[in-house]
Each structure stands twice: as structure tokens, then as C-alpha cells.
Image (cartoon, helix red, strand yellow):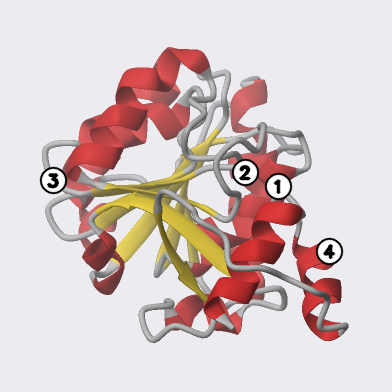
Amino acid sequence: MRNQILYYAWKYHGEWKQIAKAICEQEKWDVLSYEGQFVTIVDDEYPNSLRMLEFPPWILFYEGDWTLLERKAVAVIGSRKTSFYGKKACEHVVSLLKKRYVIISGVAKGIDRFAHQEALSHHTIGIIGCGLDISYPKENTLLYQQLKKNHLIISEYPKGVKPLAHHFPWRNRLIAALSSSIIVIEANIKSGTMLTVNEGLILNKSIYCIPHAYFEEQGKGCNLLISQGANVIVDDQDIEHI
């Protein structure tokens, strides 16, 4: 079954529904020679937290230290277009959280990048929406290399799969599932960050938000979540309670 899933993932470029259809219909498959590490849903090493998802990934390709998934983790997420305030808030929050948690984020521009970079002195996990051989965005190439060498980077897409737009909201469910809590640093009301939060709420994850000034567009998502009942971070003591 493990090799069967790998073949379908390769044939269908990691697309969940097509893999599911192939498994259901027991489509013809062949043993595939694949250079790289992977874990499938039938393996003992598969994270139990992902089995709680409505659509758990059939396969996870990875590079780095898989055992980091055994440690308690929090997600730190936010906008790709960040303000100076958002950058400084992210770095400060992560500087405190990284001492107790593995930091999970999406290796995107902005808040994701700042969260990973601040956590490099401890442990961090990146979840991406393309093959592990593709660095996206390009400016994160060095960060990719650091994650692969000393931390962990994960994708449900085999090598060669491009970063298509629909991959990113889909991968957000993994960020939510692998984290015990979700910390939102900066977010517009309509954004991938809010989709991750929605996934987290379905999974009963605790949501924490940095408050923003009234006129800051990048922070309206955070303020909305706070008004709806998310935990607000106002000082270091709040971070210590996460």
C-alpha cells in the first residue's frame, strides 16, 4: 500500500482527490523509484494529529528531522506583506515561544519567513505547497536549505510539482493540525491566514492574536478575530501562558 500511494502521488502530482479516486478504484500501479524520504498514511510514523483532518494527506514528503513532529509545536502565521510593527512583533513573540515549542509556519514571504528565521536557533518546521526541490519564493532559497539541513520541511507534493495557487490554502490545514495553538501576528480579513485559523477552529485549536491600530489594513484580520473571541496578546505574560 505504501508504494501504491507513492505511485499515485507521483502520477497525480499530489492532488488529494485524484489519489483518493485511484485508491478507491484500485487503479493499476507500478513500483516507483523515488529519491527522497516520505511517510504515508498507512505508516506508523504518520502523525496522529493529521488523521483528525477531514482530508488527511495520503503522503508526506520531507527533508530534515522527522522526530521534530514528536515535540509540541505552535504555528506562527500572518501576512506576506508585512509592516515594521508586524515584523518586530513576530520576532519578539517567536523569541519567547521557541524556547518551549517547535515553531511551524508556511515558508512564505513576510511573517512566515520572519518566524522561521527567528526560530533557526532552536527548532522550526516549514510546510510548503510545492515539491521539495522547488524553492518558492526564490528569496527564501537559503531558508529552504537551512530547514532541510537542521530542521524539517514537509510537503504532500512530490518533487517537480510547481507552487500552484490552490496548493497554499490546501496546505494550511496541515499547519493547523500539527500545531497545538495558532498565533496570528498580522492578517487582512480576506487572506490565507484566516483560512488557517478556520481550520484550527474546526480542530479546537487555541487562537492568539496580536492587536493592531484602527487604520492598519494588515491588522484588521487580527482585530476581527479578537472581537470574535480569539485570545489577545498584550504582553510577555500572555505569551508565557500559551
Q: Amino acid at mark 3?
A: His
Q: Earlier in the sequence, mark 4 or mark 2?
A: 4
Res. 169 mark: 1
Residue drawn 22% across and 59% down? Answer: 101
Mark 1 surroundings: few (<14), some (14-19) or many (≥20) residues within 10 A: some
Asked which secondary structure carries label 2, the reply is helix
Q: Amino acid at mark 2?
A: Thr
Disc 4 to disc 3, C-alpha distance: 38 Å
The mark nearer the N terminus, 3 or 1, is 3
Q: CA distance from mark 4 to mark 2?
A: 26 Å
Q: Which mark is residue 122?
A: 3
Three-letter code, disc 4: Gln
Q: Which residue is label 2 attached to?
A: 193
Kindly identify which numbered label has been placed on residue 18.
Answer: 4
Q: Quadrant of the N terminus?
A: bottom right
| x and y percentages locating residue 215 in the rendered image | 65, 20
Looking at the image, tell me whether mark 4 or mark 1 is earlier in sequence order. 4
